[in-house]
Amino acid sequence: MPLLRRCALSLVAALAVLLSVAAPARGQDTTVAGVRIGLVYTPGTRPGVLVLPVGGVAGDSIRAILQRDFTYGDRINVIALEPSAIPPFGDGSSKPNYPLFTRLGAAAILEVTPTSFGIQVAVHNAGKGLVERTKAFPLPAGTLSANWRLALHDVADEIELWVTGVRGIAATRILYVSEGRVYQVDSDGANPTPLTGAATAMSPVWNPKATHIAYMTMGPAGQQIVIRESGGATRVLPTRNGLNMTPTFAPDGNTIVYAFGAESGTDLYATNAFGNEPARRITVGRGSDNTQPSFSPDGRRLAFTSGRVGHPEVYISDADGTNAELLTPYNFGDQSYRANPDWSPDGRLIAFEALIGGRMQIMSIGLRDRVIKRHTSEGVNEQPSWAPDARHVVFTSNRGGTRQLWVLDVESNTVRQLTRALGARFGAWSPRSVVASSVGPSPTPTPPPQAQGTCHESWTSRTRPLGTRPRRRLRLPEEAGNDVDPGDADA
Amino acid sequence: MAEKRRADSVAAAAAAAEAAARERALASTRATLAAAVYFEYDSDELSGDARSTLDAKLPILRANAGLRLRIAGNTDERGSDEYNLALGQRRAASVKRYLSDQGIDSGRMDIISYGEERPVVTESSEEGWRMNRRAEFEITAGGDALVAPR
């Protein structure tokens, strides 16, 4: 069977089963990290990966970080055995006992060996009984330093790409605000680091290359927008006096869109983030509040919050503000409140927050079918921001007693706590390129999954029941093309 | 001599009483000027009570031409933190518009929004929320020369 056709059939079967199981999974929620509600992810639905004990002084840390990254990625089932419980793998003189590892649930066995400049990784395909991939990864000096960890997260992401066809999101960072300061934290919750001094910051965002961030601070005559380089240099965007807030960068990296309000409502404006030309107004709110812009990945569309019908709802429009339409339907007379849209990086969904029973909850809506899904139920949950894999969302929740950032897997509705700060809010997930800006050029640039010509069905056929979940790499080219064109879906 | 002392004493007492009365009037003037106005949930409309509160400020603003005010819009904690900044801005603008419509030079009034960032009551209750949905008034100039309206 031709490869493409085989992949397509897998996709159809996967979609069919996904549709049958996705609905009951709505509303699932747990506050206990690592505990899953098993409707979607029963054991064995993801490829099992066993990480062999790693030698060297940092071996235990390397193994723990890789295993945790895979677990947080929600696409790999880590076979978490104590080193003493792992059978001997062989010393290279004889073939490893692959069937034994298959019986332990391992589709892949990860063999990591420290080298003088980093680590050597070999991924064994247990089903086929052979080494599938090997690669040497450099790691920077300073074991367990922030840059070293980020480089190791990048290794985890690449291994996840090999095994599942989707690159991981471990080598990313998340901005947030605590006590008025902008912080960044690694995707696994390590290294919370303040980026700004004591102030009144809100609403931080990354630019597409993660070389700059923008945020709002309270100034003497209202609110200002500040743009900060990764090196620390800052610039106040030349705006008019008044309420300047909720900045967002367009995918072109130069245009910044923000909300400006004075005495006749708040509207969206666009300008060059690095220039001095006057901003041009995008929305025509006629005295209403139009805020919280979020671009579609192709930069052609914009989602935003508007109170033009009397209460906040999510709208989408062309990037120049024309063709605005209500995205979130409401029933006339309802006390409806929907806000804070964030367009998913694959263009398919918009996450937002909605008032349900007096509490904000994280929701998503499909751009094609306009089906709304609810993802949280415990406490107040708001301010969603997509991870670059378009599957995880960081959000603010008070479910633990104080406002903290949590990470949601929208496909299973499982959550994990990300921050343990003195209150945290306004989470903003970085693009993947945070690696390049933080530790120099990425040592291993990887082509996008769909650019590769192989179908990894054999990797998972032993451990994943047929069609439990479509993997993004199996998309057909014409379907992938639609991902970044939600405007067509709206027509 | 005794009569003069008595007269001085009476005059001093009268002056003190007058000063005290002036101080009370000034304190009352300041309190009237600072009195917050309150709003319904997700609304910038001025209620009858809010208009009465603002009307009481008009003679003070007319009697003190050098007085400048900053009107700060605030919201309760419910809803989006960011959208609440816009709502607070709208509330402050609504107050400014009303005072301006009553003849107060709009150049004497600045507006700012603090959204839900500066609650006066941190308790999550209907009463706490009601107290936080407000516009506050701060004197930014002319406060030292403030006189009570006649």
Image (cartoon, coloured by chain):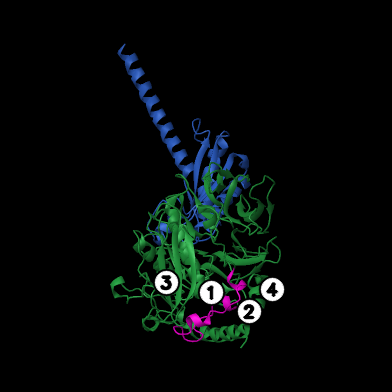
Chain colours: A green, B blue
- Based on the picture, tell me whether residue B125 belongs to the magenta stretch: no
Which residue is rendered at x = 44% and y = 56% of the image?
Answer: A148
Q: Which residues are the magenta region?
A: A448-475
The answer to the question of whether label 3 and label 2 lie on touching residues, with beta carbons closer than 8 A, is: no
Between tags 4 and 1, which lies in front? 1
Which comes before the other along the chain, label 3 or label 4? 3
Which comes before the other along the chain, label 3 or label 1? 3
Between tags 3 and 1, which lies in front? 3
Residue A476 numbered mark, or none = 2
Residue type pointed to by label 2: Leu
Question: How many residues crowd around disc 2 within 10 Å: few (fewer than 14), some, or many (20 or more)?
Answer: some
Question: How many residues crowd around disc 4 within 10 Å: few (fewer than 14), some, or many (20 or more)?
Answer: few
Res. A415 in view = no
Which residue is rendered at x = 45% and y = 70% of the image?
Answer: A122
Residue A110 numbered mark, or none = 3
Per the image, the residue denoted by label 1 is A165
Which comes before the other along the chain, label 4 or label 1? 1
Q: Position of residue A299 (x, y in %)?
A: 66, 62
Between B68 and A74, which is closer to the camera in this rendering? Answer: A74
- Element class at badge 2: loop
Q: CA distance from mark 3 to mark 2?
A: 30 Å
- Element class at badge 4: helix
- Chain for mark 1? A
Q: Does label 1 lie on the same chain as label 4? A: yes
Residue A456 versus residue B149 in the image, above or below: below
- Element class at badge 3: strand
Which comes before the other along the chain, label 2 or label 1? 1
Per the image, the residue denoted by label 4 is A488
Q: CA distance from mark 3 to mark 1?
A: 16 Å
Q: CA distance from mark 2 to mark 1?
A: 14 Å
- Chain for mark 4? A
